[in-house]
């Protein structure tokens, strides 16, 4: 509390502060007292991840014996990972400025192996754990265990099993399409829950995290909905890193919203010459975000060849932006597909981060399409090719 000159004023200030303690984030520090079942000794780390930059920071670490440990320190309340070695076990808790008691059992953990990918690891997610002493974590688990969310679990499990056991790739993607349709309903239901939570708890950092987590899985969330919920955040929530991230996402989404001048960029063509997007003005241009490894992207190519042939002479063009990190894969796909329009390849200037232009255009999945008018303004921004078709018919006629 800052120094004041008048004792009377000081007393009044103290009384006001006491009455509003619940609304002030004190950052007194966290203590995590843990008990591990199935492991007697090893090393425990408390790791905070920055999803936007794909980086990790170890907040604390400690060796343990007898299956117990204690972590202490000061950090912004946030979702963190408790990582345990040997074995690379992990589970997540929402860090809070309080004493938290954690009990975790390695039995029944979900194992994973990503070593087939560059830089991939293997380990296990601990599923059986409890946390007491943290309202933030309690609120997060209440959200996770909401019956509205839980009802979708068996549906996703059934479709995941079908995808894993089906060898025919076309059939796999039919199941994936079904899963995407279910996931859309799932995310819409989750949005209702998050919106209600933020309305009731506008200062909760958990609310900001819920919204950020929802966007990670629901990048098609209507922008106005995202802005509406973000604008309701206040207090500690507005001071959190999740609020900063949400504001950044909103700014980037506004930059590619319908009616906005599309962000300019320059990328290399196959012959290593450069092409700048703004040089294509004067025509209606569809930016096609794709990759050689993307099955639905390549399935869509015959359709776009028909569209190109139909409208090209009327002032329509396509610019394909590949998400391939290896040019040899890009070359091979172009040789097979023989697309008659301009091709450029995206860049990956930062290790382990998404492609530069794809990130600029907030393409969280592919195929994705952005249709521009003759002045370079966004007409359609969508992963649905039907919306492009409809707009082109509106512009050029059937």
Image: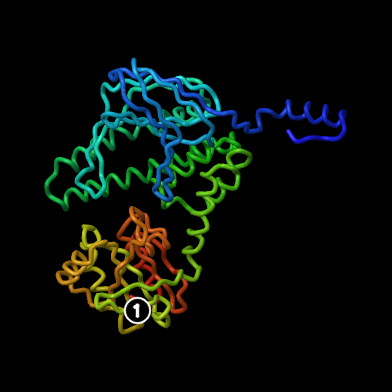
Q: Quadrant of the C terminus?
A: bottom left
Circle 1 SS class: strand
x and y percentages locating residue 345 in the rendered image? 29, 68
Which residue occupies 25% across, 75% down?
A: 270
Q: Position of 339 compared to 129: left or right? A: left
User: Which image quadrant is residue 366 in?
Assistant: bottom left
Q: Residue furthest top?
A: 66
The residue at 28%/38% (across/down) is 156
In the rendered image, which quarter is residue 337 located in? bottom left
- The residue lying toward the viewer, choosing from 385 and 223, is 223
Relative to 92, residue 211 above or below: below
Q: Nearer the viewer, residue 35 or 285?
A: 35
Q: Between residues 33 and 321, which one lies in front from this camera angle?
A: 33
Instruction: Please give left or right for residue 43 compared with residue 14 in the image.
Output: left
Q: Quadrant of the N terminus?
A: top right
> Residue at image x 42%, y 32%?
46
Q: Which residue is mark 1?
A: 316
Q: Position of residue 80 (x, y in %)?
A: 43, 35
Q: Position of residue 170 (x, y in %)?
A: 16, 53
């Amino acid at each position: 509390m800052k120094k004041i000159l008048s004792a009377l004023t000081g007393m009044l200030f103290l009384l006001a502060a006491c009455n509003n303690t619940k609304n002030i984030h004190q950052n007194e520090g966290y203590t995590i007292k843990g008990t591990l079942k199935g492991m007697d000794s090893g090393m425990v780390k408390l790791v905070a991840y920055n999803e936007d930059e794909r980086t990790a920071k170890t907040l604390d670490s400690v060796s343990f014996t007898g299956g117990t440990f204690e972590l202490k320190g000061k950090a912004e309340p946030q979702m963190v990972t408790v990582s345990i070695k040997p074995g690379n076990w992990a589970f997540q808790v929402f860090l809070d400025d309080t004493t938290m008691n954690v009990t975790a059992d390695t039995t029944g953990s979900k194992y994973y192996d990503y070593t087939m990918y560059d830089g991939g690891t293997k380990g296990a997610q601990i599923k059986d754990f409890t946390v007491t002493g943290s309202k933030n974590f309690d609120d997060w688990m209440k959200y996770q265990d909401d019956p509205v969310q839980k009802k979708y679990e068996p549906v996703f499990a059934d479709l995941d099993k079908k995808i894993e056991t089906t060898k025919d790739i076309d059939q796999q993607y039919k199941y994936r399409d079904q899963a995407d349709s279910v996931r859309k309903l799932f995310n819409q239901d989750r949005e209702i829950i998050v919106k209600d939570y933020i309305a009731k708890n506008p200062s909760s950092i958990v609310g900001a995290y819920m919204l950020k987590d929802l966007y990670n899985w629901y990048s098609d969330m209507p922008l106005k909905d995202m802005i509406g919920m973000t604008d309701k955040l206040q207090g500690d929530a507005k001071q959190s890193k999740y609020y900063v991230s949400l504001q950044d996402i909103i700014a980037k989404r506004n930059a590619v919203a319908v009616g906005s001048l599309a962000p300019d960029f320059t990328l290399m063509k196959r012959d290593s010459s450069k092409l700048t997007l703004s040089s294509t003005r004067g025509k209606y241009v569809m930016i096609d975000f794709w990759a050689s490894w993307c099955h639905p992207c390549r399935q869509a190519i015959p359709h776009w060849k028909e569209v190109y042939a139909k409208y090209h002479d009327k002032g329509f063009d396509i610019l394909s932006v590949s998400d391939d990190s290896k040019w040899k894969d890009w070359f091979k796909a172009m040789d097979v597909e023989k697309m008659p329009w301009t091709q450029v390849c995206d860049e990956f200037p930062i290790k382990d981060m998404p492609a530069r232009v794809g990130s600029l255009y907030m393409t969280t999945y592919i195929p994705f399409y952005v249709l521009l008018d003759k002045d370079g303004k966004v007409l359609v921004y969508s992963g649905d090719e039907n919306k492009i078709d409809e707009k082109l018919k509106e512009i050029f006629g059937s």
